[in-house]
Image (cartoon, rainbow, N blue to C red):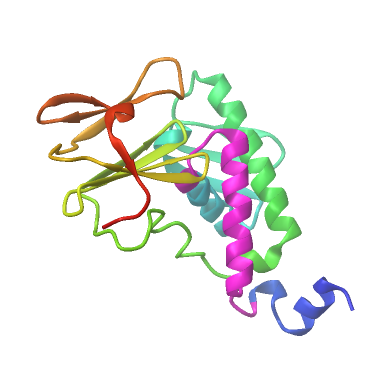
Amino acid sequence: MSREERERQTGLLGGASAPSSDQLAALADALAGIARQHGFARNAVHAMWESLRRGQGHMAHFDHAEFGGSGQWLRGGMVVVGDIFNDALALRVGALCDELSQLLAAHPAWAAEPPRRLSVHWWPAGLDTPASSGAQNGIRYAWFPVQRRLAVERDGEVTLYDTDDHHIGGVAQQPGGPGPLCFSSQHGPVDLATLRRVENPD
């Protein structure tokens, strides 16, 4: 018996049952790979997946900074992004939606219900709620003042840094795309390379 037949018999196809933990893990891995491939942050790709899931893979209404704000995608080639003169972004968003639509068609059981827990807390366990966080050009960060830790996610890998007595208030990526990160603090700009890397949260 094929996997699809087993899923149909157990009610996984057609939204009759919630995805299993294995299916949600597989979905998270697939979305992370698609995010890396298209150069979008994983939370942005998750948001687009939700929009496509609600549109049953045929359409998506979205509102996310990485996609130029509010916009719409329709299967067949129609793409509208908030940054209306950014043709390059429209092409990237269209390619992303095409791939997510194909993923949804190939794995309908993954969309049986919203994957609410996907990447809600992408940082390591044991850290408190971040005081500041953000994302830019596929890189995410979160600062935890209690533990004096800064978590940075790049290409699906999370690295922790000791922020010492710095109070991280924001991040600014250097011009020219992905590269060194510079954070603002009460002492002025802080280059990420000057912070000590740590293995685990305290």
Q: Is residue 28 left or right of residue 47?
A: right
Q: Does residue 43 show up magenta in the picture?
A: yes
Residue 68 coordinates in the image, percent (x, y): 44, 31
Q: Which residues are magenta?
A: 16-44
Question: Of 49 and 165, which appears nearest the observer?
Answer: 165
Residue at coordinates 35% horizontally, 54% vertically from top-left?
200
Judged from this view, the residue extending furthest toward the bottom is: 10
Residue 83 coordinates in the image, percent (x, y): 45, 25
- Looking at the rendering, which quadrant does residue 126 occupy? bottom left
Residue at coordinates 60% horizontally, 34% vertically from top-left?
38
Residue at coordinates 44% horizontally, 15% vertically from top-left?
176
Residue 186 coordinates in the image, percent (x, y): 10, 31
Q: Is residue 10 left or right of residue 42?
A: right
Question: Of 142 and 62, which appears nearest the observer?
Answer: 142
Q: Is residue 120 left or right of residue 167?
A: right
- Taking 190 as reference, is 99 above or below it? below
- Taking 154 as reference, is 172 above or below it? above
Q: What secondary structure prevails in the magenta region?
A: helix
Image quadrant occupied by the N terminus: bottom right
Residue at coordinates 28% horizontally, 28% vertically from top-left?
194
Residue 147 coordinates in the image, percent (x, y): 20, 53
